[in-house]
Image (cartoon, rainbow, N blue to C red):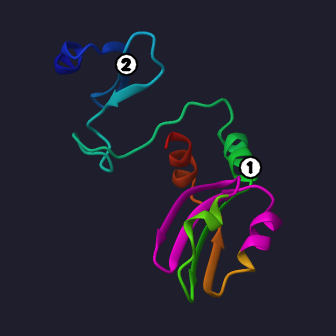
Amino acid sequence: MAFYSRLGFELLADNEMGNNRRWLQMGFKGNSTTITLVTWFKQMPPGSVQGLVIRTDSFDEDVKELRENGYKKISLSTEEPVPAQFFDIPGIANLEQNQNSISFMFNGNVMTIMEKLHKLPLVDILIEEPSLEEIFLHYYE
């Protein structure tokens, strides 16, 4: 904890969790982003960057709202390369193109993207719900 204090972090919470366990939460004054210091999660060993803690009043409702915003994860391959500007339409994010393979996130009316995609010489297409992690990461990119 002393190391983080020297970096300017302030102690926000120091909670006993039983069995000689503590939950330390630190952050910068006036900033809502915090770090949590624990050593007792097997999935999150000290020094790792694993785990995500989300503060919400209603997790299920928030996840439902995020998913209902219409985000779809689309991956496709085509017979021939597609010009990058082909996907220059509202709702496209995280576009990755490698020759004839293309992937992106789409938010909007599914018919908008389907009208575009039917013009391509498709070899394969996969349209799926993005994972919760992908949805959250999209908002931070």
Say few, some or many: other residues with alpha carbon within 10 Å of mark 2 (under 14 / 14 to 19 / 20 or more).
some
Q: Is residue 80 magenta?
A: no
Q: Position of residue 28 (x, y in %)?
A: 37, 15
Q: Position of residue 84 (x, y in %)?
A: 56, 66
Residue segment shown in magenta:
89-116
Of label 1 and label 2, which has the lower sequence position? 2
Residue type at mark 1 is Asn
95 up-or-down from 17: above or below: below
**For residue 116, which numbered disc appears in the image?**
none
The residue closer to the viewer here, 38 or 118, is 118
How far apart are the two marked residues, 1 and 2, measured between alpha carbons? 31 Å
The residue closer to the viewer here, 66 or 45, is 66
Q: Is residue 130 visible?
A: yes
Q: Is residue 28 left or right of residue 87?
A: left
Quadrant placement of the N terminus: top left
Query: According to the image, label 1 marks what residue?
Result: 69
- In the image, what residue occupies the spot 69% across and 53% down? 91
- In the image, what residue occupies the spot 30% across and 15% down? 9
Q: Helix, strand or loop at disc 1?
A: loop
Residue type at mark 2 is Gly
